[in-house]
């Protein structure tokens, strides 16, 4: 099977690129010329996985089917996992996929391309910590769903347990760890509201961070605000604390042991080991090395988002964030539109623009900084305004893949659904 453009990975960046490219080509030539490949049948915007994990977002409602998105946006979709790449022959190999019972879903097969975009994202980095298998991760929707099911079971058990307590430890005080804590606190409060007084149980939630402060990549003020907000909700925030090992029921740190029924690893990212075997230049974190045009070491192969190591300022790399994946998708959209129309894409380079960061601290609260906006200044936002701005990023992603009308209908439908079935998914 041949397509002019093959995008592997339908996440924050890859799906936006395939959708916008397909729409630009139109109903007739889009599906013939653009193909998206993903190992999953549905898309969930990764920055919402902490909500899926806490049960405050239903992945079955939130997930958008790739086949429906392909039809709406005029690209072809193929279910498959990238297994091999022959950059000289411009072909890629997709591995066979099986269902939960081991039955074959799709066979191993080969695709050919003229231009390939790798947008396969990243996973967790355990930095060689022993006992990593005892931790939950939030790498994909299935991980978040698995944690949610075990969390619900743990809530139920704790309500009937003699000690009436549940311990959860989160390794990593970055945005994922902080946002997950806030959601877990709300999930616990909603659960308590439905229980008898004698079934009420305590949630001992601990965030462990090796750096001197949480949200270390953001300004001091935001990190201090987030710490205060979490501590007000009885979250124990342990900074300057190094995790030495994970055990089934505890974290071993250089500050002592932390008993934990559930452990979530939200510290550090690393791309898939398989990336290093595709014959492209990669970094120690298995990211594809790209230049400022997002070109990898092979002709006609581009990479974007978390799986790409793209130069930024002062020898740093562009951070692994949804806003970078979105910007890079926009840049490659321009390049690929030129190439598809047999025009030279010109000498434009991708420059990452940091518009700031927003962190959700629960249903009605957020903190963050916005950069380069009014008068080019960096200014801080907090409370409900920050939360609304945070939610608008999700809507902007939906707009790129569903259009403005589709996003409005979907947002309204979810609001109404939530009114009827409540905020927490308990089944
Ligand atoms: C809980 C959480 C909260 C976050 N919050 C924020 C935030 O507030 N702001 C922010 O900027 N960033 C946030 N991030 C980071 C952000 O989600 C990522 O930077 C962003 O999703 C990267 O986009 P991507 O397109 O590179 O990869 P992804 O969105 O991860 O998409 C990768 C896609 O590739 C597919 N795939 C992977 N391997 C293969 C393969 N071998 N073959 C075929 N398909 C494959 C996957 O199924 C997936 O669909 C958060 C991340 C997490 C986990």
Image (cartoon, grey):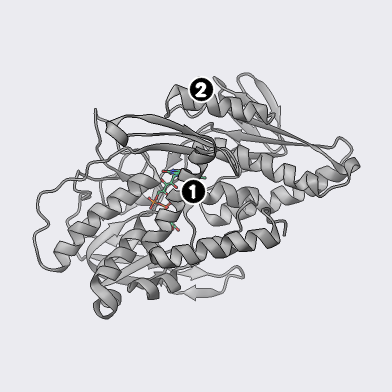
Q: Classify residue 73 by image quadrant.
A: bottom left
- Mark number displayed over residue 366: none
User: Residue 360: horizontal and vertical position, in percent?
Assistant: 53, 40
User: Residue 373: horizontal and vertical position, in percent?
Assistant: 31, 37
Which residue is painted at 48% across and 51% down in the image? 46
- Please tell me whether residue 377 is drawn above or below residue 82 in the rendered image: above
- Mark number displayed over residue 213: 2
Q: Classify residue 379 by image quadrant.
A: top left
Q: Is residue 39 visible?
A: no
Within 8 Å of ligand 1, the CB of disc 1?
no
Within 8 Å of ligand 1, the CB of disc 2?
no
Query: In the image as oriented, which residue stretches furthest toward the bottom?
Result: 28
- Please tell me whether residue 11 is drawn above or below residue 31 in the rendered image: above
Q: Viewer-proximal residue, 299 or 350?
A: 350
Which residue is painted at 87% across and 45% down in the image? 160
Tell which tag, 1 or 2, sits nearer the viewer: 1
Q: Secondary structure at mark 2?
A: loop
Left or right placement of residue 268 versus residue 152 in this view:
left
User: Residue 345: horizontal and vertical position, in percent?
Assistant: 12, 57
- Upstream in the sequence, badge 1 or badge 2? 2
> Alpha-carbon neighbours of circle 2 within 10 Å: few (<14), some, or many (≥20)?
some
- In which quadrant of the rendered image does the N terminus lie? bottom left
Left or right placement of residue 343 versus residue 313 in this view:
left
User: Residue 2: horizontal and vertical position, in percent?
Assistant: 26, 74
Contact (CB < 8 A) between labels 1 and 2?
no
Q: Viewer-proximal residue, 186 or 300?
A: 186
Question: How far is the residue under mark 1 from the one under mark 2?
Answer: 25 Å
Which residue is painted at 14% across and 48% down in the image? 348
Q: Which residue is tagged 1?
A: 391
> Alpha-carbon neighbours of circle 1 within 10 Å: few (<14), some, or many (≥20)?
some
């Amino acid at each position: 099977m041949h397509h002019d453009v093959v995008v592997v990975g339908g996440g924050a960046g890859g799906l936006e690129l395939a959708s916008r490219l397909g729409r630009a080509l139109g109903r007739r030539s889009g599906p013939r010329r653009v193909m998206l490949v993903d190992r999953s049948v549905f898309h969930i915007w990764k920055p919402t996985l902490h909500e899926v994990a806490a049960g405050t977002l239903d992945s079955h409602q939130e997930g958008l089917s790739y086949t429906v998105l392909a039809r709406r946006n005029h690209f072809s979709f193929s279910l498959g996992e990238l297994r091999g790449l022959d950059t000289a022959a411009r072909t890629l190999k997709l591995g066979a996929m099986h269902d939960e019972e081991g039955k074959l879903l799709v066979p191993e097969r080969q695709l050919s391309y003229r231009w390939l975009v790798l947008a396969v994202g990243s996973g967790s980095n355990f930095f060689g910590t022993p006992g990593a298998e005892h931790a939950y991760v939030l790498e994909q929707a299935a991980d978040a769903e698995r944690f949610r099911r075990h969390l619900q079971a743990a809530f139920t058990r704790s309500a009937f347990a003699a000690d009436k307590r549940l311990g959860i430890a989160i390794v990593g005080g970055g945005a994922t760890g902080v946002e997950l804590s806030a959601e877990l606190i709300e999930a616990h409060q909603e659960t308590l509201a439905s229980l008898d007084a004698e079934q009420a149980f305590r949630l001992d939630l601990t965030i462990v961070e090796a750096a001197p402060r949480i949200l270390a990549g953001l300004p001091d003020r935001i990190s201090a605000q987030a710490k205060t907000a979490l501590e007000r909700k009885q979250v124990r925030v342990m900074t300057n604390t190094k995790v030495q090992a994970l055990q089934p029921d505890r974290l071993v740190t250089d500050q002592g042991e932390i008993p934990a029924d559930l452990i979530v690893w939200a510290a550090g990212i690393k791309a898939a080991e398989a990336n290093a075997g595709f014959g492209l230049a990669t970094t120690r974190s298995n990211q594809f090395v790209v230049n400022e045009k997002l070109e990898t070491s092979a002709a006609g192969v581009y990479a974007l988002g978390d799986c790409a190591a793209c130069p930024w300022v002062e020898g740093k790399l562009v951070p692994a964030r949804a806003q970078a994946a979105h910007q890079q998708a926009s840049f490659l959209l321009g390049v690929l539109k030129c190439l598809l129309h047999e025009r030279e894409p010109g000498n434009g380079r991708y420059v990452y623009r940091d518009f700031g960061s927003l962190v959700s601290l629960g249903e009605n609260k957020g903190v963050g900084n916005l950069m380069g906006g009014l008068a080019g200044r960096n200014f801080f936002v907090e409370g409900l305004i920050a939360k609304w701005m945070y939610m608008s990023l999700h809507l902007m992603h939906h707009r790129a893949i569903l259009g403005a009308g589709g996003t409005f209908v979907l947002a309204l439908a979810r609001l109404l659904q939530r009114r009827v079935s409540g905020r927490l998914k308990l089944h």
